[in-house]
Amino acid sequence: MTEPVTIDDDLGALLHRAAALVAQRLSERLSDHGVTRAEWVLLALLHAEGAVPPSLLAARLGFTRGAVTKLIDRLRAKRFVVRTRAGHVDRRYQTIALTGAGAVLVPRLRAVVAACDAEVFGRLAREDHKVLERSLRCLLDPADPCSRD
């Protein structure tokens, strides 16, 4: 007689469940600050990169241009980002930049994200945490040679 197959036998399903746990916890924490996870990711990217065109935001975040436009509109309504034309000759060319309020908010949100990560991943031993991070980076980066020791 064979053992019954469960969803926990599927590594992809386990990864999905773990990602859902992290996403749920982070969404709860970020909502206390009036932003969604998608808004946080866009704000963090702008904080790191400076003013960028919406098409680059879409490409870097893996979102459609329409989704990025909606995110930008929500963040503009919250006064965290602005659209700029920055002296470009083509009037259609725009960049998105953080406002002062957005620039102040990002480090606060980064602390929220770090606390959430510590809550979720703090259960892992330090070495297990390093192995998990290294493994995930290997899966996500095609240029990573992924040591197979």
Image: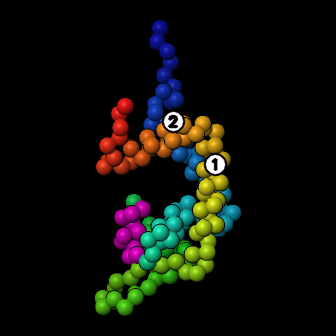
Q: Which residues are magenta?
A: 52-61
Q: In this rendering, is residue 137 above or below 31?
A: above
Report the number of discs.
2
**The magenta stretch spans residue 57:** yes
x%, y% of residue 36? 58, 63
Mark toward the start of the polypeptide (2 vs 1): 2
Q: Amino acid at mark 1?
A: Ala
x%, y% of residue 6? 51, 25
Q: In this rendering, is residue 144 above or below 148?
A: below
Q: Amino acid at mark 2?
A: Leu
Q: Quadrant of residue 18?
A: top right
Residue position for label 2: 14
Residue at x-position 64% and y-position 66%: 108
Secondary structure beneath dot 2 equals: helix
Residue at x-position 49% and y-position 15%: 3
Residue position for label 1: 118
